[in-house]
Image (spheres, helix red, strand yellow):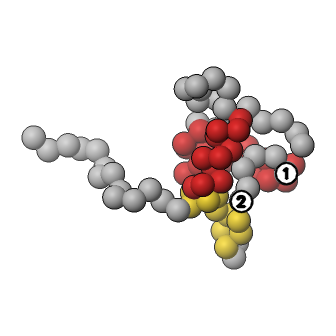
Amino acid sequence: LMSMTAPVPAHPPLFFTTDELAQRWSIAPKTLARWRRERVGPRFHKLGKRVVYARLDVQQFEEDHMSGPASATVQVTSQ
């Protein structure tokens, strides 16, 4: 029986694009752009004009800001 889902990569990505991270957290990419301007949200890197988020930074941010053990809502506070 063939599956119609995309294959899972052997190794998780080292970086997420803005769109990938927005999809992961079910938020709009514009929210991530606003967080970058306001200097809240996870650490990001610029590669030329491209913005990326390191997987380890994203995971740390999730651990630090998620409410509850299995929450899908990101809680951001101004620093």
Quadrant (top left, top right, bottom left, bottom right) of the C terminus: top right
Choose top left, top right, bottom left or bottom right for residue 46. bottom right
Residue lying at 55% horizontally and 43% vertically, measured from the top left = 23
Decide if residue 17 is in sight here.
Answer: no
SS class, disc 1: loop
Residue lying at 57% horizontally and 55% vertically, measured from the top left = 55
Quadrant (top left, top right, bottom left, bottom right) of the N terminus: top left
- Left or right, 20 with reference to 61: left
User: What amino acid type is highlighted by mark number 2?
Assistant: Phe
Choose top left, top right, bottom left or bottom right for residue 50. bottom right
Judged from this view, the residue extending furthest toward the top is 68
Decide if residue 60 is in sight here.
Answer: yes
Residue lying at 75% horizontally and 52% vertically, measured from the top left = 33
SS class, disc 2: loop
74 shown above or below 30: above
User: What amino acid type is highlighted by mark number 1?
Assistant: Arg
Q: Residues within 10 Å of mark 2 (few under 14, many from 20)?
A: some
Using the numbered discs, state the Cα–Cα distance from disc 1 to disc 2 in whole angstroms: 10 Å
The reply to whether callout 1 and callout 2 are in contact (CB within 8 Å) is: no
Residue lying at 67% horizontally and 73% vertically, measured from the top left = 47
Where does label 2 land, which residue? 44
39 shown above or below 54: above
Where does label 1 land, which residue? 39
The mark nearer the N terminus, 1 or 2, is 1
Question: Where residue 22 sits in the image (x, y, percent)?
Answer: 61, 45
